[in-house]
Amino acid sequence: MMLMLLLTLTTVGAKTRIMLISDPHVMGPGVLIKKGAAWEDAVYYDRKLTEYSAEIFDELIAIALREKPELFLITGDLTKDGELVSHQYVAEKLQLLKQAGIKPFVIPGNHDLGTEESMEFDGNNSYDVKVADAKQFAEFYRDFGYGPDAERDENSLSWISEPLPGLVLIGVDTGNDGTPLNGCIKGVTLEWLYNRAMEATRQGKQVIVMMHHSPFPHVVNVEKFNATYAVRLALPMAEGPYYYLDHSYVVDRLAMAGVSVVLSGHVHVTDIAKDANGTLTNTVHDISTASCVSYPNPYRMLTISDDKATMRIQTSYLTELPGKDNFQALSEERMKSGLSHLIWDYTRNDEYCDLFSDIILFHVMGNEPESPKMKEYMDMYEERSPEMMTDPQLLENLVAYEVTFVELRNMVYSMLEDKNHYGNPDKEGVMDDLNTTIPMNNQGWTAIRTVHQETDTDSGQWFTLQGVRIPKPAQKGAYIHDRRLVIKR
């Protein structure tokens, strides 16, 4: 009896520690045979230290072995571009954690099942390389989310597991590069996710969702430049592959299922933001973590309180790498170089290129308002705005993206002021991106909210979340009506 009591106390009363990394983009042995023109062309726009990715991953594994968290999570883009040898390398290293009693869990990112850059490099030449398919991915990570201890979604690489009593993890597959599902959740998968999360929360369990793409944009208007910044809902069409609905449908479903914490990556920015369902009664926090192989090379430690009511978030950085002098300076220089090459193609102006590069690098770091550079960059942007408004190259690109100068300015200020939902009086706010504590219980945006109900009408078309057109439904459930998610209770 005494033994059982002690076991209960150590299980229920203990805090849970989780080490979180994202986008390690590990390049396995043999992918880079010899540097040369082919490699230099491939990394011209790269902001990552890809050639050191395996060593960086090794160092993070070593940190995990020293820190001994209960869980070790990776929110996608495990490999450079889905190479079999890269997946093999990652899986072997994760086995070291498993042997030490640490439980790793992974989800795929948009680079993990092959891209146009899936090559091996040998001097001036590059060659196609073997990449993993979905079946092989699940086999590589059988012990890390895809084994018998987890339940799989039959329509994707999504899974659900309860690694610790009362704590449920749901890993969500949000698609791969070069496919119609890049940055998307299928309707059937969203319903699977909703049902599993709802079941867990009704049982009093805490649910954490991992997905590679953010569930909602942290910066206003950014999705106009990057359509895959935030996840979309993909519904099948009779003609054509899919019909897409924006992130709000996904957020609404997550919030109504009782999910209050999402862990994401993809955009290589360290930022924390929150959104809510349409009536602002249930909030969802998204903890976006920048790539560990990009400056400033972050990783996070998450501590869940013993009553599972709060999560403490602490951000650290890999500042040294064995055998590499001035590692952080090298990492920062790679980030600046890649950004400059990318933004030059949009601006063709040295001053604008430097300004936008500096603003993005500043944003990547997080907690922008705490730095005096925020005001400095805002003043520089305003000073150059009149000439930018008449610059033909910049105008041409804004027209191509269907973005106005006002929208561009709001996006820049949303970054600099770290304001999520910039300009939205109901939602605009600033959160600590690096070291903070957030509630894990699903709560409303404010203490009291008025819920408005629309008049029920028969106008418009009704669809299931699988994209099947139906008459106006009488049964309870979730449906699409006039391009809106409707919950019939």
Image: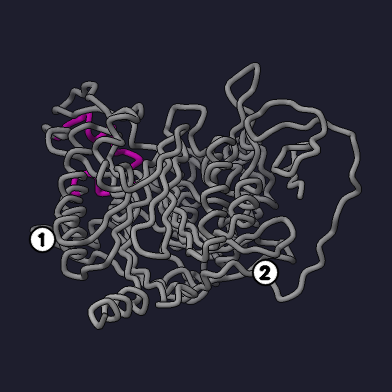
Q: Which residues are magenta?
A: 35-52
x 61%, y 57%: residue = 255
Q: Looking at the picture, how far across and down is residue 391, in whole percent?
A: 61, 43
Q: Looking at the picture, how far across and down is residue 377, in whole percent?
A: 52, 65
Residue 397, placed above or below residue 309: above
x 89%, y 34%: residue = 459
Task: Please tell me which residue lies in front, 106 or 416.
Answer: 106
User: Counting residues from the N terminus, which is met first, the one under dot 2 or under dot 1?
Assistant: 1
x 26%, y 57%: residue = 103
Residue 47 highlighted magenta (yes or no): yes
Disc 2 from disc 1: Cα separation: 46 Å
Q: Looking at the picture, how far across and down is residue 223, in whole percent?
A: 58, 45
Write down the residue under mark 2. Answer: 445
Task: Please tell me which residue lies in front, 198 or 287.
Answer: 198
Secondary structure, mark 1, is loop
Looking at the picture, which amino acid does disc 2 mark?
Answer: Trp
Q: Is residue 215 visible?
A: yes
The coloring applied to the image is: one colour
Residue 273, placed above or below residue 457: below
Outermost residue, top direction?
239
- Say left or right for 362 vs 300: right
Q: Quadrant location of residue 410?
A: bottom right
Secondary structure, mark 2, is loop
Q: Is residue 372 visible?
A: no
- Say left or right for 164 vs 170: left
Looking at the picture, which amino acid does disc 1 mark?
Answer: Pro
Q: Is disc 2 in contact with disc 1, using a CB cutoff of under 8 Å? A: no
- Say left or right for 355 vs 340: right
**For mark 2, does the 10 Å Cα neighbourhood hold few (<14), some (14 to 19), or many (20 or more) residues?**
some
Write down the residue under mark 1. Answer: 322
**For mark 1, does the 10 Å Cα neighbourhood hold few (<14), some (14 to 19), or many (20 or more) residues?**
few
